Image (cartoon, rainbow, N blue to C red):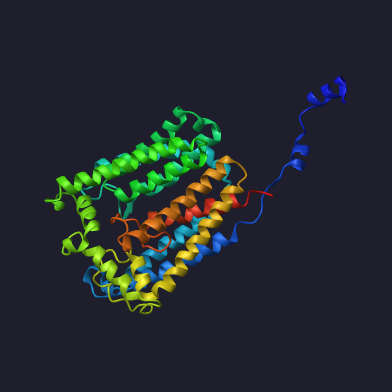
Amino acid sequence: MRNASSAYREEVRPEPSPKERKEQSPVVAVGPVDYTVFLVSIILVLFGLMMIFSASYVNTGRNVHYDFNPFFYLQRHGMMVAIGFVAMGIMANFPYRLLKIFAMPSFIISIVLLLIAAFTGSPGRGRWIDLPNFQFQPSELAKIALILAMARVVDRKPFTLHKWSGYLYCLGLTGIMAALILRGGDLGTTVIIAVIGCGLIFMASPHIWRFIVAGVAIVAGMYGAVQYIITNLYANPNDDFRIGRILAWIDPFAYYRSTGWQTIQSLYAVASGGPFGLGIGQSLQKSILPEVHHDMIFAIVVEELGFVGAGIILFMFGIMIRRGLLIAVNALDTFGSMIATGITLMIGIQALVNVAVITNAFPNTGIPMPFISYGGTFLVVCMGAVGILLNISRYSRM
């Protein structure tokens, strides 16, 4: 049996020195980035360049609005890809723990930008801020700002989600952003923001039943809203394009010449692909499918590469999501784990919703396919987010 003096000596043992802590720490200070995530993101971005040209060259080459230039979208998207690679490189080498300094300021700045976009934008385009020769989409930055803010809250107060006050605070952060984006007319991004915020709360909260209660309430509210739309606004679907999209989702062929047109043409493109597709550049629907280079580009991927080619692309997204979750599990601290989880969730849910839209499993929301769809702010934010993910992967536990 130990005597009292030995027990006392163990209790008052001095704190280990920095050198001892370093030797005992199971953390590798700096290592290589996750090359799987890096290579998959590069492949998807380059594949996107090819598909944007394949989907758009017919329309732009025959249209005076584009000066009969078949490379119109390819050139513009190529410039944004170059900027995206710069953003990825910077964020991959910027220590992610320093992002704590910018977490809450970036959230506040995003709120201000969303207010500007929601209340000063032109009708139907309230989610954009028009600049000289450039359009900026603050809702894309809002996704990263929300992830950083939530990660900072949980990192600073690890037990904040053990209490209802912290739970409601995090829901409030998500709700403010979602409400402003919805005010700007972007229902799709509102859904993405809600999923990101609720997903991070679910991952960090020990009280699953609270999340279940909130989830049931949200689903019930959405169901009630859809039922209200169907029963009270069915006669005038053109009064609101969002109502028209929901009705077209229920029965697209009933609105063949209006809100159902895009969905129907997308379904035709998917059905035409077959197992191996019609071949690169051989799509028949790209000349009549609206937003063919943006929201609906994956329908052209299925048509030209078939279910096998589209399946390979989705498999690559699956690899990225798996590696992202592994990075989150092995992150150095709670802050890095939350950020990695949020970024992985952001990329995964956007890819899932895009595929669901082109197959009419989900109402048309205008959500582009990550890394593949044409876009400026969207692409740069996605590539910058991957850079943050790569940076977190450099700091991992044994």
Asked where in the image residue 67 lies, by quadrant, the reply is bottom left
Residue in the image at 20% along x and 44% along y: 228
As rendered, which of 189 and 114 lies closer to the eye?
Answer: 189
Asked where in the image residue 380 lies, by quadrant, the reply is bottom left
As rendered, which of 275 and 197 lies closer to the eye?
Answer: 275
As rendered, which of 390 and 10 lies closer to the eye?
Answer: 10
Residue 364 place in picture, x, y as percent? 28, 56
The quadrant of the image that shows the N terminus is top right
Residue in the image at 58% along x and 49% along y: 392
* Left or right: where 154 falls relative to 73: right
- Residue reaching furthest left? 235
Residue 268 place in picture, x, y as percent? 27, 71
Query: Is residue 350 in sight in this rendering?
Result: yes
Q: Is residue 236 above or below residue 1?
A: below
- Residue reaching furthest top? 4
Query: Is residue 91 in sight in this rendering?
Result: no
Q: Is residue 39 above or below residue 236?
A: below
* Left or right: where 239 falls relative to 264: left
Residue 73 place in picture, x, y as percent? 34, 67
Residue 82 place in picture, x, y as percent? 46, 62
How many marks the image carries: the answer is: 0
